[in-house]
Image (cartoon, rainbow, N blue to C red):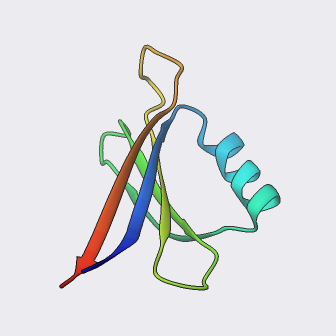
């Protein structure tokens, strides 16, 4: 069985600042974006285009804590 990262998630509160960092520091580009109709969250998937791995930024602008959370997702092949 082999494992592979599918995506890695960071929950953030400042989307513009985070996008700037990942684009300038790591060369990642926006692949797609999902936004809640009520504006409560925005999810942006970033990639360097070299494989299927994505960095997922979940922006929660009104979250009471100004912190970063992380989530990792794996895929595997038997």
Residue 75 spot, x, y in % from top left: 28, 72
Taking 59 as reference, is 26 left or right?
A: right
Q: Residue furthest front?
A: 1
Q: Residue furthest right?
A: 24
Q: Residue at x 46, y 15 (%)?
A: 65
Taking 12 as reference, is 35 left or right?
A: left
Q: Residue furthest left?
A: 78
Q: Residue at x 53, y 19 (%)?
A: 66
- The quadrant holding residue 64 is top left
* Front residue (pair 40, 72): 72
* Number of on-image labels: 0
Residue 12 spot, x, y in % from top left: 52, 36
Taking 51 as reference, is 35 left or right?
A: left
Is 13 rendered above or below residue 17? Answer: above
Q: Residue at x 43, y 34 (%)?
A: 60
- The quadrant holding residue 47 is bottom right
Residue 9 spot, x, y in % from top left: 43, 50
- The quadrant holding residue 58 is top left
Is 40 rendered above or below residue 57? Answer: above
Residue 68 spot, x, y in % from top left: 51, 31
Q: The N terminus lies in which quarter of the figure? A: bottom left
* Front residue (pair 12, 42): 12
Q: Residue at x 60, y 35 (%)?
A: 14
């Amino acid at each position: 069985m082999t494992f592979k990262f599918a995506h890695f998630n960071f929950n953030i509160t400042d989307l513009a600042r985070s996008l700037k960092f990942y684009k300038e520091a790591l060369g990642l580009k926006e692949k797609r974006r999902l936004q809640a109709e009520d504006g409560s969250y925005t999810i942006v998937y970033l990639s360097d285009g070299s494989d299927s791995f994505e960095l997922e930024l979940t922006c929660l602008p009104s979250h009471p804590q100004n912190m970063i959370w992380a989530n990792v997702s794996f895929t595997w092949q038997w």
